[in-house]
Amino acid sequence: MQTSSLILALLVLTGIAYQLGRMRSLRVAGGARGARKLHSLPSYYGLLTAIWCGLPALVVVLGWQALEDRIIAGQVIQSMGGSVQELAPGELSLVLNDVRNVVAGNVKPDAVMPEIAVAALRWQRLDGLSRTSAAVLALCVALAGGWITLLRIKPTMRARNRVEQIVRVALMGCSLIAILTTIGIVLSVLYESLQFFRFVPVTEFIFGTQWSPQLAIRADQVGSTGAFGAVPLFAGTLLISFIAMAVAVPVGLFSAIYLAEYASRGFRAVTKPLLEVLAGIPTVVYGFFAALTVAPLLRGVGERLGLEVASESALAAGLVMGIMIIPFVSSLADDMITAVPQALRDGSYGLGATRSETIRKVVLPAALPGIVGGVLLAVSRAIGETMIVVMAAGLSANLTANPLEAVTTVTVQIVTLLVGDQEFDSPKTLAAFALGLMLFLVTLLLNVIALKVVRRYREQYE
Amino acid sequence: MNRPVPAAQDQSRIRERVERGLRRRYRAERRFRAYGLAAAVSGLLFVAFLFLSIISTGYTAFVQTYIRIDIRFNQELIDPEGKKDTETLRIGDYSGVFKEALREKFPQVEGRRELRQLYGLISDGSAFDLRDMVLGDPRLIGQTRELWLMASDDIDQLVKGKIDRKLPEDQRVISDLQLGWLDALTGEDRVERRFNRVFFTAGDSREPEQAGVLGAVVGSFLTLMVTLVLSFPIGVAAAVYLEEFAPANRFTDMIEVNINNLAAVPSIVFGLLGLAVFIQFFGVPRSAPLVGGLVLTLMTLPTIIIASRAAIKAVPPSIREAALGMGASQVQVVAHHVLPLAMPGMLTGAIIGMARALGESAPLLMIGMVAFIADIPGSLTDPATVLPVQVFLWADSPERAFLERTSGAIMVLLAFLLVMNAAAVILRQKFERRW
C-alpha cells in the first residue's frame, strides 16, 4: 500500500473513531438526555478516541518510513555476501545506487551484473513486504488504540482534561522545534567540521592564506595539492560586506531621517512602501542585476577612466548588496528615530536649535544604540548573503583590498563546494561545512549582540 | 539680570555675529535636508532602475518569432512503410519534413554548409510540434499545409533587434546568407512575432526557444505547499504555546532567544542543515520538492511564529477574561476566541513567510534542486527545481536568448510575489481589527 493511501485510510479511521467515541459516550450516559451526567462534552470523548486511534498509528508510519530504507539496504548488503560487505563506504554506495536504479526501473535488470539484478529483485521483495507489514501494523495500532479508548469511556472519565493535556504537550512540542533546529544546525555543521579538522588542522584553516580546494584525484597529479587556508575568503567577505555597508548605511540612515523628520505625510506614504519593495525582491534577482547590468556598467566606466575593473569585481557585488540592505537599515533606523520621545526634540527646539542640529545633536545620539544594533544585524545579513555573490563575485581566492578586483566569499565557496554530486568523506565537501560553521558562529555572535543592544534600547524609552 | 548692559556698539556687533552664524546654520540645515532627500530619492531611483532594467530586457521573452512555411507531410519521411501505427508515427523523421520544406522554399541553396545554415532558421523543436500534429491527426500524411513554425533562438533575437545586423559578419551569430533568406521571408510576410505560449507551458530545455517556466512554477508550487502545510500549523501552535501557556522561566526564555536568532541565521546554513540531516541522515530523495519544503519550513518558521505571536498579543485580555469567567477552560479560550480573532494577522504573517520562501534559492542549491530537469514534476518526490533557481540556472547559460528569458522568468516570479504581498495587504486591511 502506498504511504499516501495508508495515511488517508488512517484519517478515515480517525474520523470514524471520533463519531464512535461521541456516540459511545452518549450511550453510556443513557442517551441525549443523560449527557448532563457526562464529565465533558460528548465531542471530547470523540476527540480522545480519535487521538488515540490516529496518533500512535501515525507515529508508527512515519518511524517506519524513516528507517525502512536503511534496514532494507542493510538486509540487501548482507544477502550479497562478504565481498560486498568489505567494500569501502564510497564503493558500497555506488553498488547500492546501481541496485536502486534497477529497482526504480531506470535501468533494465539485464543491463547490469547478475549479482546486482538479484539484489534488486530481493530489494523489491523486501520493499513490498515492508510496505504490507507497515500497513498492517499501522492499522492494527489504530484499531487497538481506538478500541481500548472506546471501552474505557465512562461518564466519570475526564475526557476534556485528557484532551487538553495532549493539546498542551503538542503545542509545547511545536515550540521545541525551534530549539531542535538550532541543535540540528550546530550538530550537523559541527560534526562534519570536526571530520574536516582531522584532515586539515584548525590553525591552518583559520590562519592559512592559500585557498585552493581542488584535490588530487591521482597521487601523481600536478598542481592540485589542496590548500584550505580560509583567510582570503574571510577577507573577500569582509570587503564585499564593507562596500555594501558603505552604500546602505548612509543612504538608509539619511532616508530614514528624512522620512521621519522632514517628509510630508504624502511623500512618506508613497516612499516608504516603495523602499520596502527592495526588501521583498528575491536575492537571485539582485544577483542577475549585478552580473548583467551593474558589472558591465562599472567595467565601462572603469575603461573610460583608464582603470582595470574585473568583470566580477567586488565593487559590483558590494554595490548591489548595499542596495538590497538599504530598506533593512532604513526601516530599523526609522523605528529607532520615531521611538525617541518628542520631549527631547522640543527641549532642543526651545533652546533655539535648528532641525538638523536637533537631529544631529539630540535625536541621533539618543537613537544611536538602536541604530548600531540595526547596522550590526545588517552586517550579519551581508555576510550571510549568498545569491548575489554567487552570481556576481568571483571564484578565485584573492587576498586583496582593491574593490575593482575579483574576490570570493565564504558563501560562494560553500555553494561551489557543495553543488553537484559529492562524496561525504572528502575534505573538499567537508570544508564547506567548516565554512558553514564559521558563518554560523559569526552571524550568531553579531545577532546576539545586536538583539541585546536593540532590546536594551527599546526598554530605555518604554 | 544685573550683568552690565553692553554698549550699543557691542550689541550691534553681537547681532551681526549671530546673524552671520544664523545664515551658516540655515545653510547647514538646507544641506542636511538635501542629503536626506537625495538619499530617499536615490533609493527610489534604485527601485526604478532595477525594474526598468529587468522589464526592458525581459518583456520580449513573452513573444516569439514564427516563420510561415508550406509543409508537405511527406510519407516517405514519416511513415515509409505505410503502417500508420502510433509507434511508427512517433519515430518518424519530422525534422526532415521541415528541412525539405525549407529546401523547396529556397531551391538555389546547395552544399552542406549552406544547407546547415538554412536549416538553422527553424527551431529543432518544430519537429516535435509536427510530430504531435501528425499523432493527433494521421490523415495529415501526404497533405501540404501552410504552418507557422518556431524560429530558432538566434533568428528570434535578430528579429527582436537584440542582435545588431550592422556588425561585420564574423562578429555576429547570423551569417549574411541567413540574413538574406530572412529578409526574403519577411518581404513575403512570412515572419511574425506571436505570443510565446511555449514559455508558459514547457519545462526547462537546453534550447532557449523551447524553454519554459512551467516546470519551475509547478516545482515552486509543490515546494510551497509542503512548506505551508508544515510551517503554518507548527508556527501557530508554537506561538500559542509561547503566548498563552508557557510558564515564565528560563526554558521559555531560551526558546524565545532561539527563535529570534533563527530568524537572522543566513539561509544557506539551513541548506547545510537540510543536506546533513534530511538527505544524509533520513535519506529523503535529493532535488525533490519534499526536502525543499522541509528546509524552507525550518527557515520560515521563525517568521511565522513572530508574526503569529504579535497577532495573539493584539487580542485584548478582556476577551480571555470574559471567556474564562463563563467557565471556559484555557484551551477552550484559545481555540474558540483567541485563535479566530488572531487568524487574519496569522494568515498575513504566513503569506509574507511564503513570499520569502518563494524567493529563496540559496538553501535549495545545497540540496540538489539545481539539476537540469526538463520534465514537469508530478509528485513531491520527483526531481524538481523552483522559479528562483531556474532564474539562477538560466542566468548562467551562455546562449544570448536566455538573457531575455531569465528576465522573463524574473518577471513571472515578481508577479507571483506581488500577488502574494497584495493578498497580505488586503487581508490586513479588511480583517484586522483595532481594539
Image (cartoon, grey):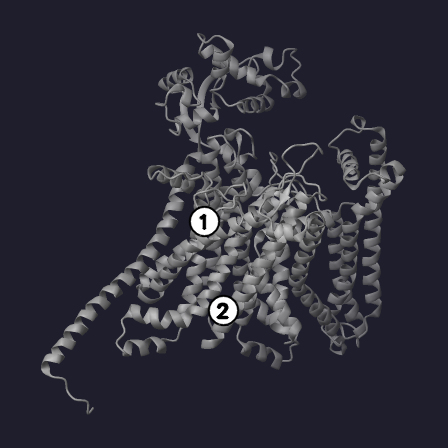
Q: Is residue B54 visible?
A: no
Q: Chain of mark 2?
A: A
Q: Chain of mark 1?
A: A
The answer as to whether the residues below labels 2 and 1 share one chain is yes
The front one of A116 and B313 is A116
Q: Earlier in the sequence, mark 2 or mark 1?
A: 1
Report how many numbered discs are placed on residues in the image: 2
Going 67% across and 14% down the picture, which residue do you hit?
B83
Is residue B220 shown left or right of residue A291?
Answer: right
Going 30% across and 64% down the picture, which residue do you hit?
A264
Type of amino acid under label 1: Gly
Real-space CA distance between mark 2 and mark 1, rounded to the nearest whole angstrom: 26 Å
Type of amino acid under label 2: Val
Is residue A428 shown left or right of residue B123?
Answer: right
Spot the residue most to the bottom: B2
Going 57% across and 53% down the picture, which residue do you hit?
B267
| Displayed quadrant of residue A177 | bottom right
x and y percentages locating residue B125 in the rendered image? 54, 25
Neighbor class of circle 1 (other Cα within 10 Å; few <14, some 14-19, many 20+) is many
The front one of A43 and A48 is A48
| Displayed quadrant of residue B370 | top right
Q: Which mark is residue A92?
A: none
Q: Judge whether B376 appears above or below A108 on screen.
A: below
Is residue A94 shown left or right of residue B65?
Answer: right
Q: Judge whether B375 appears above or below B364 on screen.
A: above
Residue designated by label 1: A318
Is residue A373 shown left or right of residue A273?
Answer: right
x and y percentages locating residue B38 in the rendered image? 31, 56
Residue designated by label 2: A454
x and y percentages locating residue A181 in the rendered image? 66, 59
Q: Nearer the viewer, mark 2 or mark 1?
A: 1
Callout 1: helix, strand or loop?
helix
